[in-house]
Amino acid sequence: MDLKVPSVSLPGIEKYLEGNIQQRKHIFKKAEEMASEMNAPIVGPLVGNFLRVMCAISSAKKILELGSSIGYSTLWFADAVGENGKVIYTDLDSKNAAIAKSLASEANLQHRIEYHIGDALAYLDNSTDQYDIIFIDLDKSLYLDALEKALPKLKDGGLLIADNTLWAGRVRWDYIDENTEVIKKYNQIVSTYAMLLTTIIPLRDGITISLKKSDQ
């Protein structure tokens, strides 16, 4: 979920990049406007489109979101998984879920989404499924817990994607607050873990994407 701080990326570059996805569907623009009015955290169109591309490239059919807010990233994933795909939405707030359901229904994507209102990590603990993509976008203090719980539930060849991993640039400074330390530790672990192939992309507030190797 986005911080209400300036982006790490150069504003002019982001403006150029967004200009190349102006033809995105109306439902995404509506969700962006709603998020702005509500001051709700969303990943934004650049990251949303990136998630859709990652989903399409990997032919993902089962996706778990850990933290979904008003379901903006959910829409991008649901748009990409196809008629036989499924996206699991998780959020603590029933009001967020109601908005997410309304947006998905308007986009005629509601049949591709399963909603869970409650603790995302508890859902993951109780799930017996394997996922093609797990997207981490919950409270930053929980990222290490999410990593530990998510890896066994991620298919070999699956993608683990985490948002806000440049943390408004704080990761490059000597910040000592808890959230910054957790994000720095998360990036360090996934970048050196033998079973993962990882890159950090400086798109908006940073996206860390890890491929779970199938040869371990």
Image (cartoon, grey):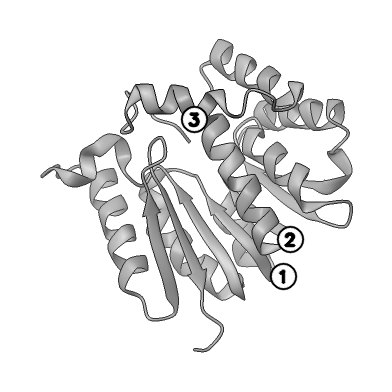
Establish if 64 lies above or below 115.
below
Q: Along the horizontal axis of the image, is 116 left or right of 143?
A: right
Image point (51%, 79%), residue name: 213
Which is in the foreground here, disc 1 or disc 2? 2
> Circle 3 — which element?
helix
Q: Alpha-carbon distance for marks 3 and 2?
A: 28 Å
**Label 3 vs 2, first from the N-terminus:** 3
Q: On the image, numbered disc 2 is attached to which residue?
A: 62
| Residue 193 - label | none
| Residue 51 place in picture, x, y as percent | 59, 47
Name the amino acid, label 3. Answer: Leu
Q: Along the horizontal axis of the image, is 199 left or right of 188?
A: right
Q: On the image, numbered disc 3 is attached to which residue?
A: 17
Q: Do tag 1 and tag 2 residues touch (Cβ < 8 Å)?
A: yes
Which residue reaches farthest top? 37
Residue neighbourhood size for the residue with mark 3, other residues' Cα within 10 Å, grouped as few (<14), some (14–19), many (≥20): few
Q: Alpha-carbon distance for marks 3 and 1?
A: 36 Å
Residue neighbourhood size for the residue with mark 2, other residues' Cα within 10 Å, grouped as few (<14), some (14–19), many (≥20): many
Which is in the foreground here, disc 3 or disc 2? 3
Frontmost residue, 150 versus 92: 150
| Residue 120 in sight in this render | yes
| Residue 140 place in picture, x, y as percent | 38, 45
Frontmost residue, 150 versus 18: 18
| Residue 129 - label | 1
Frontmost residue, 196 versus 127: 196
> Circle 2 — which element?
strand
